[in-house]
Amino acid sequence: MEYETELARKTEHIERELLFLYKSPVVTGDDLMKALGYKTSDAFRQAIARGTLPVNIFTIDKRRGRFALTADVAAWLAKESIKSEKKMKKRQ
C-alpha cells in the first residue's frame, strides 16, 4: 500500500509541474524529448523507430509530430524516481 500511495503522490506532483510548465495536457516535440530525458533529437527519433519510448505516443490528424499525455509522462517519471530511491536505500 505504501508504494501505491507514494506513486500517486509523486505522479500528481509531477503532473502538476508538467501542466504548469507546458500549459497543456499533451507534450510534443522538443518538450517531450526533454521530459523523457533524451539529449538529442536523433536519440529520440531512434527510440520512436525502435518502439522503445517509455510512454505511449500518438499522432493527431492534420497535426505534425508525436504527442504524449502529460499524465503518462508524469506516471513514468514517478515510477522511475521511486525505483531509483529503492536502489539507493539498498546500497546504504
Image (spheres, rainbow, N blue to C red):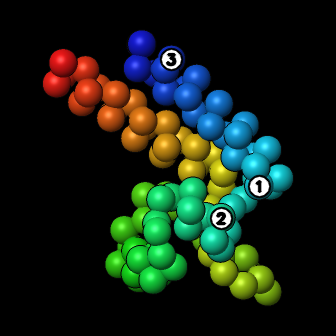
The residue shown at (65%, 55%) is: 69
The residue shown at (45%, 83%) is: 42
The dot on residue 5 is 3
Q: Seen in the image, is 67 located left or right of residue 83?
A: right
Neighbourhood count class around disc 3 (C-alpha, 10 Å): few under 14, some 14–19, many 20 upward: few
- At label 3, which amino acid type do we have? Thr
Residue 20 % position (x, y): 79, 44
Residue 60 % position (x, y): 72, 76
Residue 68 is drawn in which quadrant? bottom right
The dot on residue 31 is 2
Of the pair 88 and 26, the residue shown nearer to us: 88
Residue 33 % position (x, y): 55, 67
- At label 1, which amino acid type do we have? Tyr
Label 2 near label 1: C-beta < 8 Å? yes
The answer to which of marks 1 and 2 sits earlier in the sequence is: 1
- At label 2, which amino acid type do we have? Asp
The residue shown at (67%, 68%) is: 28
Residue 30 % position (x, y): 63, 71
